[in-house]
Image: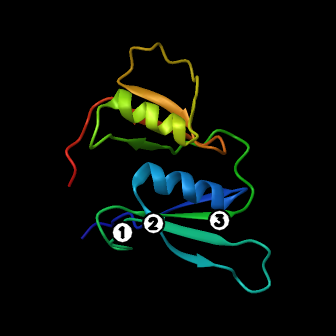
Amino acid sequence: MACRMGELVLDCHDPEVLARFWCEVLDFVELGREHPEGVDGYAIEIGPREGFGGPQPTIILRTGEPAEAKSNLHIDLNPTDRDSDAELERLLKLGARPADIGQTGEEPWNVLEDPEGNSFCLLKGRLDPL
């Protein structure tokens, strides 16, 4: 049997802000918090309403120093209940910002950043929900 992705971990300045943002974007809920004793930081785990172990990984947002250099990993999103233009408008209202990485405008995706500047893409193709 192969592995399955269970969690994505993202170091950030403000887990509260990113938890709210990504919960709205992905229709996730807060699953738990961890405040390790003797440590200043904390982590918030968000994920599908069904919780950990389903077909989608959870996201752990933990206090820490985000990477200064460009990350080689980013999230691609597919709209499921509206077209990509409507979803782009929704994401911008939630606090996403357009990101210019040298795209031509002909790509089948939009490049965005979350409130802390982490890049992600909104694919222009729509998927049927599970």
Residue at (57% x, 59% y) in the render: 19
Residue at (45% x, 37% y) in the render: 90
The numbered mark, 2 or 3, whose residue comes first in the sequence reads 2
The numbered mark, 1 or 2, whose residue comes first in the sequence reads 2
Foreground disc of the pair 2, 3:
2
User: Label 2, label 3: how many angstroms apart (C-alpha)?
Assistant: 16 Å
- According to the picture, the residue beneath numbered tag 2 turns out to be 29
Badge number at residue 49: 1
User: Label 3, label 1: how many angstroms apart (C-alpha)?
Assistant: 20 Å
- Circles 1 and 2: CB atoms closer than 8 Å: yes
**What element does badge 2 sit on?**
strand
Badge number at residue 127: none
User: Label 1, label 2: how many angstroms apart (C-alpha)?
Assistant: 6 Å
Residue 129 pos. (x, y %): 22, 50
Q: Is residue 110 above or below residue 25?
A: above
The amino acid beneath tag 1 is Arg
- Circles 2 and 3: CB atoms closer than 8 Å: no
Q: Is residue 21 above or below residue 50?
A: above
Taking 5 as reference, is 33 left or right? right
Q: Residues within 10 Å of mark 3 (few under 14, many from 20)?
A: many
The numbered mark, 3 or 1, whose residue comes first in the sequence reads 1
Residue at (53% x, 37% y) in the render: 93
The amino acid beneath tag 3 is Arg
**What element does badge 3 sit on?**
strand
Q: Quadrant of residue 29?
A: bottom left
**What element does badge 1 sit on?**
loop
Residue at (39% x, 42% y) in the render: 77
The amino acid beneath tag 2 is Val
Residue situated in front as seen by the camera: 4 or 99: 99
Residue 18 pos. (x, y %): 60, 54
- According to the picture, the residue beneath numbered tag 3 turns out to be 62
